[in-house]
Image (spheres, grey):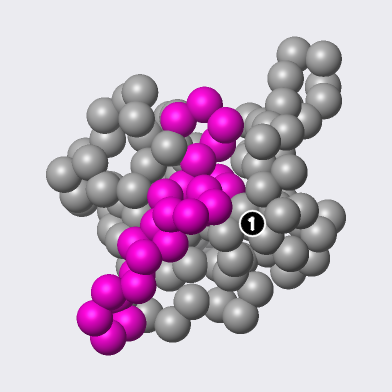
Amino acid sequence: MMTKRQKRMAAVAALLLGLGLSAYFVLSAARKNMMYFYTPTDLVEHRVSEDARLRLGGLVTVGSLKRGEGLNVEFTLADCEKSLPVRYQGILPDLFREGQGIVATGRMQQGTFVADEVLAKHDENYMPPELAKSLKSADGKHNCAPFKSMQQAAR
């Protein structure tokens, strides 16, 4: 027969075990659903598995937008160093324009980023923080002047 103290210790141990298992399951589920942010340079220079779900951010190259049959769209996304072709099937956001910053979610397939979601910036000051950081030079200034001039010309 267990004493009162032993019963209390068993209950505490069972509670701690339950909390530990719960934390493990929550963290493992979060790790599986975690999506990393990449720029075109990151994806061109480093191989990623084709089944990995990624977020890709960059600026839509002016003159690269090609509309296919139905809702199929192809364009090039760049970060001032490298560019990457993107394929998307769906309705593009109203704010999507060439020369604008976007974030696309999808997977790499044979050198092309196949997006299943495209988000356009909502105002002139917005850019994903990771993308803004990657577009700055060592002196902290925006080093992507060609896109700025293209953006002005596109308006």
Residue 17 in sight: no
Q: Residue at x 43, y 62 (%)?
A: 65
Instruction: Name the side, left or right, on which 14 lies relative to 152.
Output: left
- Relative to 87, say whether 36 is above or below: above
State the residue lying farthest toward the left.
110
Q: To which quarter of the image does residue 103 belong? A: bottom right
Let me know if residue 72 is in the magenta part: yes
Q: Residue at x 76, y 53 (%)?
A: 152
- Residue 37 horizontal/vertical position (percent): 50, 44
Q: Nearer the viewer, residue 35 or 57?
A: 57
State the residue lying farthest toward the front.
153
Three-letter residue code for mark 1: Gln
- Residue 80 horizontal/vertical position (percent): 57, 31
Q: Residue at x 77, y 30 (%)?
A: 142
Let me know if residue 69 is in the magenta part: yes
Mark 1 burial class by Cα count in 10 Å: few <14, some 14-19, many 20+:
many
Instruction: Name the side, left or right, on which 87 lies relative to 149.
Output: left
Residue range highlighted in magenta: 56-82
Disc 1 element? loop
- Residue 126 horizontal/vertical position (percent): 77, 56
- Relative to 96, say whether 18 is above or below: above
Q: Which residue is mark 1?
A: 100
The image quadrant where one finds the C terminus is bottom right
Instruction: Name the side, left or right, on which 16 lies relative to 68.
Output: right
